[in-house]
Amino acid sequence: MHRSIRSSLALSLALAALAAAPAARAAGDVAVELTANRVTRSQGRDVLAPAEQARPGDLIQYRALYRNQGAAEARGLKATLPIPRGTHYIAGSATPRRVEASLDGHTFAPVPLTRQVRLPDGRTVTREIPASEYVALRWSLGALPAKQERAVTARVRIQATEVAIVPLIER
């Protein structure tokens, strides 16, 4: 497998959410701006830089900024952030901390998510679901006053993705 193919695919997957909706509209006069930054460490501190390029193993921080551009308060605001394929959510990286997660993009519950598992002896126990299985995060932001803004963030790590190269068969 060529490393450049894996890197290009990983970058495409990680930035898919940005290409789909770099500046989408939320309910009413609320606009949302989604950005992605690569996270590196320098002198013991996190450094953010635009994620124009990324490689497998890179840490990416997504930030969704909600701005109420209207004259009235926006109520019942919920922020949803998909976790792109080829990445996995880093547990505990979401802010605000009170966040819900989903395994299917439709049903959300407070983190950490759990599931019932049947053991070989027949007992059923509750186990925490790995954060790497989350496909979306959601925050209940409540009311957003006019001309105010609020941001949510979460970090993901880009996974190495294998791509099969299939030779073409001439007919």
Image (tube, grey):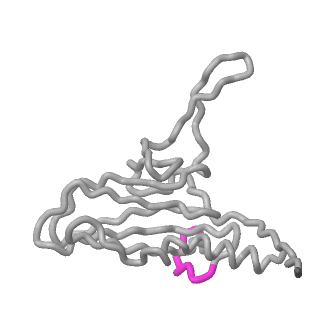
> Is 137 part of what is drawn in magenta?
no
Q: Is residue 104 left or right of residue 55?
A: left
Answer above or below: position of 109 versus 91: above
Q: Quadrant of the C terminus?
A: bottom right
Q: Residue furthest left?
A: 71
Answer above or below: position of 17 versus 111: below
Q: Residue furthest front?
A: 171
Give the residue displayed 53% in from the left and 54% down from the top. Answer: 135
Residue 95's x, y, as percent?
Answer: 41, 57
Q: Residue 120 or 130: which is nearer the viewer? A: 120
Q: Which residues are magenta?
A: 44-53
Give the residue displayed 42% in from the left and 77% down from the top. Answer: 22
Q: Residue 158 or 135: which is nearer the viewer? A: 135
Residue 76 placement: quadrant:
bottom left
Give the residue displayed 42% in from the left and 47% down from the top. Answer: 100
Q: Is residue 80 left or right of residue 159?
A: left
Q: Is residue 171 left or right of residue 5?
A: right
What kind of secondary structure does the magenta stretch mostly adopt? strand
Residue 126's x, y, as percent?
Answer: 57, 28
Give the residue displayed 38% in from the left and 48% down from the top. Answer: 98
Residue 93's x, y, as percent?
Answer: 50, 56
> Is 45 part of what is drawn in magenta?
yes
Residue 168 placement: quadrant:
bottom right
